[in-house]
Amino acid sequence: MPENLISVQLLGTSFSLKSTENLDYLKEVVAYYEGKIDETRRGVSLQDPLKIALLTGIVLADELLKERNRQPGALSTPDADEAERITRALIDKIDSILQ
């Protein structure tokens, strides 16, 4: 696979990323991280670029771990509550018919 190179400017620092990933994908990753940096800046009073980058990294690690820990196919709480309500109603109906 050919290597792609992208120039990045984040928090006052310029650097290049070299990867075999698609260039559009790399741009998407950088844009996502920039958005997270902006969210972090709005949420804290930090001015130090290193601290902002570190805190943003922790936020992204939190997102990743939460996503990994989600059970595939698991219902959201409102959906799970509704499914339980329907199941209980069906069980009650079956019980009343069998008695």
Image (tube, rainbow, N blue to C red):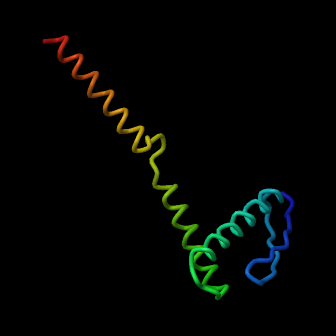
Residue under the image location 50 percent in, 55 percent down: 68
> Residue 87: x and y, percent?
31, 27
Q: Is residue 85 left or right of residue 5?
A: left
- Viewer-proximal residue, 3 or 11? 11
Residue under the image location 85 percent in, 64 percent down: 4
Residue under the image location 62 percent in, 74 percent down: 42
> Residue 62: x and y, percent?
51, 66
Q: Is residue 10 left or right of residue 39?
A: right
* Quadrant assignment, res 9: bottom right
- Viewer-proximal residue, 6 or 83? 83
Reply above or below: 1 against 58. Answer: above
Q: Quadrant of the C terminus?
A: top left
Reply above or below: 78 against 36. Answer: above
* Quadrant assignment, res 41: bottom right
* Quadrant assignment, res 45: bottom right
Q: How many marks?
A: 0
> Residue 71: x and y, percent?
45, 47
> Residue 70: x and y, percent?
46, 51
Q: Quadrant of the N terminus?
A: bottom right
Q: Is residue 21 left or right of residue 95?
A: right
Q: Hey, which residue is sitting farthest bottom in the picture?
A: 48
Q: Is residue 95 left or right of residue 62?
A: left
Reply above or below: 61 against 22. Answer: below
